[in-house]
Image (spheres, rainbow, N blue to C red):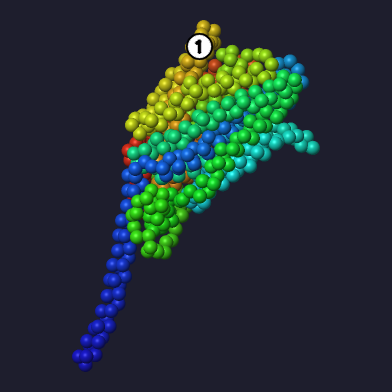
Amino acid sequence: MADVQDFTALQGTQPVHHAVSSSDSLKNKADRDYEMRHNALAAIDNAKFGWFHVKACMVAGVGFFTDSYDIFAINLCSLIMGYVYYADAAGDAANTTPTKIDMWVKGATQLGCIIGQFGFGYLADRLGRKRIYGVELIIIIVCTLGGSFAGMTARGLSVYWVLFIWRFILGIGIGGDYPVSAIITSEFATTKNRGAMIAAVFAMQGFGIVAAAIVAIVVLACFKGAVDGDQLMLDYVWRIIMGLGVVPGLVALYFRLTIPETPRYTLDVEKNTQRAAADVHKTLGHKVADESVERVCVADKPTWTEFYHHFKHWRNLRVLVGTTVTWFALDVAFYGINLNSSIILQAIGFAGKGSPYKVLLKTAAGNIILNLLGTMPGYWVTVFTIDKLGRRTIQFIGFTVLLILFCILGFGYHKILDKSVAGFVVLFTLAQFFQNFGPNTTTFIIPAEAFPTRFRSTCHGISAACGKVGAVVAQLGFFQLKDRGGKNAFIPQLIQIFALFMLVGLVFTWFVPETKGKSLEELSEGENARE
């Protein structure tokens, strides 16, 4: 009987022994995963700046070079198209693309961007950064080529509306590039250099803007004799200028399609610590775990319900409100002025009158001068100072100075031009400088850092889409007013309106956090609390 009791007692202890062993095993696995996650993130945050970081900036930056080339080349192409399709128009309408058509052709890309930024932003969180990186560039390449071959249809659809369709779809691709490139750069960057890396990617816009003008000058020079003989030969010029925008995109495409998934996404969404450790080892050369051990992982994809529960708290929502409103306010002025820089050039007498070749050449050269004086220095001063001064500080400085400059330019527009064209140019280029050493760059950087990994791309896409709504308001809304009272007569009042939006941006900058010197995990307290 005693033996039976001993045997029964022994049986009763077995399940307890197995349960304890199973619990210990799960605890040990969780501890190992936590350690691997910690080591992988530490390796990324504290890595020495090296070739992989340069490569990541170049791959993302070439995309932004292409984006800005395509966006701002239309400024020159629309001017050229006026000499082709309205050569026989009467009076002042001759050789000029009508305001409404010009507005819609330029605004098409901005409309598409809104869809692309929101859509690709969400997909990068849902499907992963790697799975969709490169798709947006394929769209850009195809639509850039398609737009350059736009022509009249047999049923009467004009070349402008065919171009509108191509550029609308092009905008979806360009819009998709914003959140995905920003997030990939942010999540691979070191904490120390993260601001400079993202700023360097964005600064490639400056090179794209200048490149569009340089290409225009070169192509015009090649066609000088033909254009002097027949201005309709300019039909080839705008198509070549636009079509050459595919070249940098083709160069970058392979590298985008082969870039690894960011370890942060692999860790926090796919829950695959093993693969994240392997990717860190492959890209940065830091071995953070035994990569021979395989684990079964169950991805935890973000949902809209989870998004709602995160942002129903004001401490989280205020950041998203800050990034969206500041980007919107900035883009009203940024795109309102930059997409219509030819108007400013005419106002200061740089474009002038003359043969089509001379007018277009001077306009392209004027764009280069304005951008080299203000835009390019602004971008690169930001790159070299943002990790020292901080994002929020630079944004405050930019909005404040722009508010002052737009008030001066808006209320003193005619007096300044009448008294000193050089003084007007100085004020205008200062505005260009402080747009880029200021909110144009920081509104791109802060959303790439301030949100949890699970929602980072979605929030960047929402912020960027709100910015493009501002661009659409400027291009399709305010600039319908520019000829109120005469050709370009309402420009001073528009600049005054831009000043008001700078004030709005300045106020809402208080809503965004300072991200300088903090890891992405430190900035994502909501995510850590959820886990």
Task: Name, please, the residue furthest toward the bottom.
Answer: 1
Report the residue marked by disc 1.
422
Q: Is residue 106 above or below residue 304?
A: above
| Placement of 101 over or under 53, stated as above or below | above
- Rendering quarter of residue 293: bottom left
**Could one spot residue 32 in this view of the protein?**
yes
Q: Residue at x 28, y 79 (%)?
A: 14
Q: Position of residue 366 (x, y in %)?
A: 56, 19
* Of 84 and 442, the residue lying toward us: 84
The answer to whether 84 is drawn above or below residue 313 in the figure is above
User: Where the N terminus falls, by quadrant?
Assistant: bottom left
Point out the image quarter for the C terminus. Answer: bottom left
Task: Tell me what residue is drawn at x 67 percent, y 35 percent.
Answer: 148
Between 503 and 385, the residue placed more toward the observer is 385
Q: Position of residue 437 (x, y in %)?
A: 43, 27
Q: Position of residue 124 (x, y in %)?
A: 49, 48
The amino acid on which the numbered mark 1 sits, given as a three-letter code, is Ala
In the image: residue 525, left or right of residue 147:
left
* Direction top: furthest residue: 419
Q: Give neighbour class at mark 1: few <14, some 14-19, many 20+ (Cα, 10 Å).
A: few
- The image quadrant that residue 269 belongs to is bottom left
**In the rendered image, is residue 271 in sight?**
no
Q: Disc count in the image? A: 1
Q: Nearer the viewer, residue 410 or 342?
A: 342
At horizontal 52% and vertical 51% (from top left) the residue drawn is 131
Q: Based on the displayed image, in which of its 4 quarters is residue 378 positioned?
A: top left
Q: Secondary structure at mark 1?
A: helix
Residue under the image location 34 percent in, 43 percent down: 48
